[in-house]
Amino acid sequence: MAHEAGRGGETLNAILDHPDPGRPALVVPDDGQVLTYGQLADRVGFLAGSLAAAGVRRGDRVAFTLPNGPDVIQILLAITALGAAAAPLNPAYTRSEYVFYLTDIEPRFLLVPASRPEAATGAAQACSVPVLAAQAGADGPPELFVHEKALEPGSGFEPGQPDDVGVVLHTSGTTSRPKQVPLRQRNLMASTRTIAAHYGLGPADVSFCVMPLFHVHGLVASTFAALAGGGSVIVPRRFTPRGFWTLAREHGATWLSAGPTLHQMILDRADGGGPPASLRFARSCSSALSPALLDRAEQEYGVPMLEAYGMTEASHQMASNPLPPGARIPGSVGIATGTEIAVADQAGRLLADGSPGEVVIRGPGVMAGYANNPAATAEAFFGDWFRTGDRGVIRDGYLYLEGRLKEMILRGGENISPAEVEQALLSHPGVRDAVCFGVADEKYGELVSAAVTLTADAAGDVTPKGLTDHCRESLAAFKVPVSIHVLDEIPRTATGKIQRRRVAEFVAGGPAPDGAAGQPEQP
């Protein structure tokens, strides 16, 4: 608790309080369903009663693995209404991955779809975790079943409090073993209110949720912040990048938030009908946005593209570029939003603006520490400043990120940011995606290497040598990759983060990462 700012705050269910309960809250385009705020609050209450009848109590944890859609939102809010913690898990996990997360979380129940997928249920059995099944309701809330018997709501329950852990998530594990992040309801609400205020979200706004709801980005930004502003959320059960355009026009989407990879997929599948006239801004978060993609997005969406900076440990957003007339600066993740941001040296001393170092943060959205991991918690803080692990610099109030500290490439004493090399590669018109990483070298310690995917019209015309020559135009010689591999796909996490270590292992002769076809091609 020593790291957190103040007590008090709100519970997550505050987002359901609307002066007009008849206003639309969730729009489900797959079946034309529209849930008002009043209906959503009633359904959340019904589900909370059902979970209480199953034995869920304040302080328990309930894991669930459900497809994206309105059921996730209803069930998560029902869990937190009881003062229990919701632990959303990726439905694409394998049995062994479920075993890891269930062992780490130790939930009271695992909630699965009515189809009872074997990977999840088998893992639950191996971990002795009781299973609840959720059946989507046509005209009401999802029905919950235990041992094939429908649960009936109990007579009452103790409501959750702001200091209760509301959501349990894990770090991405791209640089280390995933760590468990317990976010209190007041942490989540502080971030939710900040996002709603920063983008001026109001009752007329309609968020198009394209991100997975098992991740803090889709939950807090796309959903909670939209509801906190009194607006609506388009939450499809099955999202396709091509389908975005028609649905966004039909339902009057005013904004969307996604990672750069997903934005690129949406833009690649534009249907020729032009951007929705209702759009007023787009937001990018979860990984670095290239200036080229920013420009393209603004042209094709027809609205400002605002890059933001978020982390699970901060309940998502820490910084963002502002809406006009504020300046949005390519290459910057913007200004601090509801969080104090500074840059520190290795000893934890805060540095002056313009001096690069580790980005540190503090504020009401920041977690107190990792669950059951005091060593990781101690390492993660300089006093009450949380260490993000990102290298960055602040200039005139705007934060510029230079990459993960643990991923910096050290070549002959020179620190090289993989992100800088990736930006150079992405500025080539034939490059669709890029990842940079270090490879061991006896003389220099590490050398710079990279992998790329090419646009459809560039395949066969772009060579590694041509890409190397392109990099020399904007990078010092020691930063230019000594080898560039062309892959069919570059593996990323579910939220679009690059998995550098997996690509590095692959090009060094290890097992192929998912999505990479055979050996790297050399056109």
Image (spheres, rainbow, N blue to C red):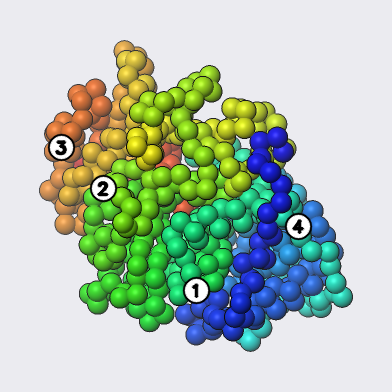
User: Disc 2 and disc 3: Cα gap in Å?
Assistant: 16 Å
Earlier along the polypeptide chain: callout 1 or callout 3? 1
- Residue furthest to the right in view is 155
Quadrant position of the C terminus in the picture? top left
Give the amino acid type for the residue marked by disc 2 in the picture: Pro
Give the amino acid type for the residue marked by disc 1 in the picture: Pro
Earlier along the polypeptide chain: callout 2 or callout 3? 2
Nearer the observer: mark 2 or 3; the answer is 2
Image position, residue 302 (x, y; %): 26, 66
Instruction: Depth check: give the residue in front, 80 or 63.
Output: 80
Nearer the observer: mark 1 or 4; the answer is 1
Dot 1 crowding, Cα within 10 Å, few <14, some 14–19, many 20+: some
The residue identified by callout 4 is: 161
Earlier along the polypeptide chain: callout 4 or callout 3? 4
* Relative vertical location of residue 81 with respect to residue 383 in this rendering, above or below: below
Q: Which mark is residue 470?
A: 3
Q: Is residue 182 rendered to the left or right of residue 173?
A: right
Instruction: Depth check: give the residue in front, 53 or 83.
Output: 83
Q: Residue at x 66, y 61 (%)?
A: 12
Earlier along the polypeptide chain: callout 1 or callout 2? 1
* Relative vertical location of residue 136 with respect to residue 509 in this rendering, above or below: below
Nearer the observer: mark 4 or 3; the answer is 4
The residue identified by callout 2 is: 291
The residue identified by callout 1 is: 203
